Amino acid sequence: MKKVIISIKGLQGTDDEGNDIELVTDGTYSYQQDSVAFEYMESELTGMEGTRTEFMVEGDQVMITRRGTVNMQMSFKAGEKYYFAYDTPYGNMMMGVNTQSVLARLDERGGSLIVRYIMDFGNAMVTRNKFEIYIKEA
């Protein structure tokens, strides 16, 4: 694992309105021939302060695990739907994520990861989402 700077731009919204969030933080990064792993601590800005977020990228699949004040594990693969338990201090709920696209351009120095997806609750669309992550050596 090496130290990196991680820039995250998250977009979420409905057809009527949207919400953007941007975060730049330090983290750690590991590159192997067939997989990439990186992690960082969430901040007050994301509403998940005290939570460690870990990404694992293997081919065209992305797995996100969060542990701390929020606990969950989500999987993203284009054209697939994944259900997960979202555990917050306010209670638990089952959510769905329907991945539209995954674009990973990562190498030993960092790179970019862009994922577009739709979140749902009870099979009803909640938000359209996109996150763009850029990683560079510290």
Image: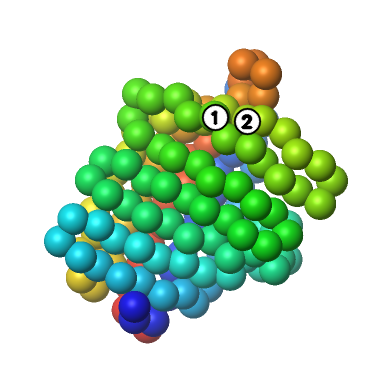
Compared to residue 66, the image places residue 95 above or below, namely above
Residue 40 visible in this rendered orientation of the protein = yes
Q: Which residue is mark 1?
A: 83
**CA neighbours of label 2 inside 10 A, class few (<14), some (14 to 19), many (20+):** some
Q: Residue at position x 46%, y 74% from top?
A: 27
x and y percent of residue 5 in the render? 42, 75
Q: Residue furthest right?
A: 90
Compared to residue 92, the image places residue 31 above or below, namely below
x and y percent of residue 55 in the render? 43, 57
Q: Residue at position x 57%, y 35% from top?
A: 84
Which quadrant of the figure contains the N terminus? bottom left
Q: Residue furthest left?
A: 33
Query: Does the CB distance between marks 2 and 1 fall below 8 Å?
Result: yes
In the rendered image, which quarter is residue 35 located in? bottom left
x and y percent of residue 124 in the render? 64, 16
In the rendered image, which quarter is residue 51 located in? bottom right
Say which element carries label 2. Answer: strand
Q: Earlier in the sequence, mark 2 or mark 1?
A: 1
Q: Which residue is mark 2?
A: 95
Residue 126 visible in this rendered orientation of the protein = no
Amino acid carrying label 1: it is Tyr
